[in-house]
Amino acid sequence: LDRVKGLGIRNLLLLRGITPPPADGDFQNAADLVRFVRARYGAHFCLAVAGHPLGYDDDTTTYDAAVQNLKAKAEAGADLVITSMCFSAPAFLKFCADCHANGIRCPILPGIM
C-alpha cells in the first residue's frame, strides 16, 4: 500500500473474497482489511467495498447476513459500495432500502460489467 500511495493512487476496491479465511491470516473478512487501511492511512484512500443485493453466490450466507457484513465494512470506514451484478431494479432498490434501514449511509453503486 505504501507503493500504491507513492504512485498517487487514491481509490481502492477492497475485496477479501468468498474463499474460507486463512487460519492464521490477518484479514478474516473485508471489514478487517478496511480497518487496517484506515488505521494505517487514515482518509488518504477512498475505500470501496462489495455489496451483494442478491446475497452471496455460495449459498452459505443469508441475505440478512450479507447486509450485516456490509454494515461491518461501512462501520470499519468504507466510503462507498459497489454491488455484484444485479439485473433486477426492484432487488437493487430493496437492498439499498434495507442497507439504509440498517444504518449504512455510504453511497451504493450498482455493479456493471
Image (cartoon, rainbow, N blue to C red):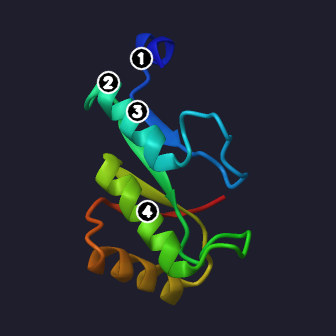
Is residue 59 left or right of 6 when viewed as pictured? right
Give the CA separation, mark 4 to mark 2: 21 Å
Disc 4 is placed on an element classified as helix
Residue assigned mark 2 = 41
Q: The C terminus is located in which quarter?
A: bottom right
Q: Residue at x 67, y 40 (%)?
A: 23
Indicate which disc, 4 or 2, sits on the residue closer to the N terminus: 2
The residue identified by callout 3 is 36
Mark 1 Cα within 10 Å, few/some/many (few <14, many 20+)? few
Please rate how many residues cluster around mark 3, counting C-alpha atoms within 10 Å: few if below 14, some from 14 to 19, many from 20.
some
Q: Secondary structure at mark 2?
A: helix
Left or right side of 82 for 60: right
- Please say if 17 is above or below 38: below
Q: In the displayed structure, does residue 98 sit left or right of residue 55?
A: left
The residue positioned 62% from the left and 73% from the top of the image is 61
Q: Measuring 34% from the left and 55% from the top, which residue is drawn there?
A: 74
Q: Give yes or no for contact between labels 2 and 1 (Cβ–Cβ under 8 Å).
A: yes
| Residue depth check, mark 3 versus mark 4: number of the one nearer the observer | 3
Q: Amino acid at mark 3?
A: Phe
Amino acid type for the residue under numbered disc 2? Tyr
In the figure, 101 relative to 22: above or below?
below
Q: Earlier in the sequence, mark 3 or mark 4?
A: 3
Q: Nearer the viewer, residue 15 or 33?
A: 33
The residue wearing badge 4 is 70
| The image quarter in which residue 26 lies | top right
Q: Give SS at disc 3.
A: helix
Q: Nearer the viewer, mark 1 or mark 4?
A: 4
Indicate which disc, 3 or 1, sits on the residue closer to the N terminus: 1
Task: Give the residue displayed 51% in from the left and 42% down from the top.
Answer: 14
Q: What is the number of callouts on the image?
A: 4
Disc on the earlier residue, 2 or 1: 1
